[in-house]
Image (cartoon, grey):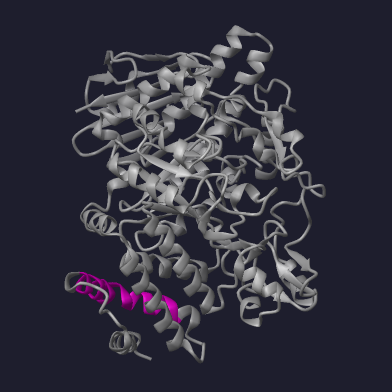
Amino acid sequence: MDISKESALSLSRILQSLDLSGLSKTQKNVFVQRLDEHFPSLFQHYYDVYGWQYDFFYHLQSLVQVLFEGFAARPRSLKSKDMARIDNPHWHKKESMLGIACYVDLFGGDLKALKKRIPYFKSMGINYVHLMPLFKAPEGDSDGGYAVSDYRSVNPSLGDIDDLKNLAAAFNKEDINLVLDFVFNHTSDEHQWALKAKSGSTEHQAYYWMFDSKDIPNRYENHLREIFPQVRRGNFSFEPSTQKWVWTTFNNFQWDLNYSNPSVFNAITGEMLFLANIGCDALRLDALAFIWKEMGTSCENQPKAHTLIQAFNRCLQIVSPAVVFKSEAIVHPDEVVKYIDKEECQLSYNPLLMALIWNSLATRKTRLITASMKKTGTISNDCSWVNYVRCHDDIGWTFDDQVAEELGINGEDHRRFLNQFYTGRFAGSFANGVPFGENPSTGDCRVCGSLASLCGLERAQAENDSAAVELAEKRILLVHSIILSIGGLPLLYAGDDFALINDYGYQQDTAKQHDARWVHRIDVSNDMLERSPNPQITDLLKRLIQIRQSNAVFGDANTHFLDAPNEHCFAYLRDNGVQKCLCIVNFSEHTVHIHSDYFTQLEQSIALDLVSGSTLDLKQTMILDSYQFTWLKVS
């Protein structure tokens, strides 16, 4: 079959039946032009997944109707932003970019109160705010809001949808980019689709993976891993109201959507466009690795998962091209990079860098982070890493075992060491972390904890050890120095800017006590905004941010990962064609010496250390103190 011919014919037929009378002539032309540009690609992806359907054209026509309705409903101000972003697609690569992720209730209380935090965002240089899930969800345990009951309703405790739209408009006025979660692998079992499925609607039962017996689930289960084994075993839950088994990858109240059904794709596209039309600039694709199920596979990172995301991307390009996707794939590094592309996800979390920063702090060695970044650290120039050190989630040690093996490191043993180190079970550890998802069969786990506690501040303060406090503060600044200088978009986690330590209060809350991730989901009070509990750290972090935002070499530039000058240092070169900046980080608590020969790659004899503000003679040996870092710029 000639796909391009069928695509053109299908679009012609669809346009003949589509009522565009509600649009002005100008807007009608914009919509049709975007369809002409992006429909061939959308048709190809949609056909690759659903072409076997006898009613394929009906579903395709229904999808275009969804796109039209989304375009017609898009506010004029956002359509203007679409045009501006089409002309400036690399906005996320600027040195001025700085993000923060926060829960609304923990960083303001509600949406109206969060609006009053804009002056704080501006004072820190923050212009990208990711609001953790804020939509209607089950009361009690809702997986931190990732069990969505209604994509079009805000959790009543936070406000309503108009409050969210008003916040988005206020952010847009202040040039702050809003990021929302698009939880599209699953809904809560209280979503209207799930409720209709429970009531016996076969149409809506087909929105999910539901089985009359455990036979087929067991065949799938042979190849699946368990995500939260400390909560329950397996990936399927029995639903008494229907006497069926439901696919529930994460929790029994989170029902996986069935993307082999084109009605699901069309329906969730409508929800996606509603979120886009609120006024967000990016949608974080939650659990995107799990969206396609294939018997006999792990049901993660399947080729059609990429096809579906590319199809969603085309839908955005037609309706709301100002909005980009952010990939959340905490999987093998080789799989992470497959989601990063202009046609798929323009932004992506960098879980490998995050994990290996912690690895280097524990081992005081940098060979694994250097080798790993050389292999998968470079991505398309149209895309950006979102670099972070902590987030709302746990830490999983997702480094490449093959890279580790080439360095003589046994991956399984090393993960066990890291878990022991960061949960404070390893002699000499400075960290106070909490195990998460500990598998009773294998003993494997992940790690939770605030950045400051994992860096040793909690333990040092408890022991009243001033020398240990100083080292912990240095570690906190060191890890932030990397995400601020290595390229991409740096993302802080709310509370880390104040060096907050673990909050163990979650252990007294029956809805949270089983989920150790709440230990680092900490309430940020108004008092903290007025006066940081750790002002020295906050002030120094703010200074590093100002240095980043004042130097174009930290924006749209290339990053070259270098062989380290010694086993304790991590080094990379930033180069935008006009300026170069050599960044060197000492991951040990000991002084290190770097011979002048190492600086010949700068091709200059004098450099400005942006961190200290001093001019350095590169013909001399450099001495880096414990956990010291330097940004050496030449023009």
For residue 295, side relative to residue 1 (left or right): right
Image quadrant for the C terminus? top left
- Along the line of sight, the residue nearer the viewer: 24 or 577: 24
Residue 456 in sight: yes
Left or right: 462 in relation to 232? left
| Left or right: 339, with 88 as reference point | right
Q: Could you tell me if residue 563 is visible in this image?
A: no
Quarter location, residue 521: top right
Instruction: Determine the residue positioned at 42% across, 32% down.
Output: 117
Image point (61%, 70%), residue name: 193
Residue drawn at x 66%, y 42% as measured from the top left: 410
Residue 278: x and y, percent?
Answer: 39, 55
Quadrant in which the N terminus appears: bottom left
Q: Measuring 75% from the left and 28% from the top, which residue is drawn there?
A: 425
Q: For the stretch drawn in magenta, what is the main secondary structure?
A: helix
* Residues shaded magenta: 27-47
Asked if the stretch drawn in magenta spans residue 31, the answer is: yes
Indicate the quadrant where residue 589 lies.
top right
Q: 344 or 274: nearer the eye?
A: 274
In the displayed structure, 475 sits above or below 273; it is: above
User: Whole-percent x and y of residue 180?
Assistant: 46, 51
Residue 17 pos. (x, y %): 32, 88
Q: In this view, does 82 lie above or below 319?
A: above
What number of labels is visible? 0
* Magenta highlight on residue 508: no
* In-front residue for pair 442/560: 442
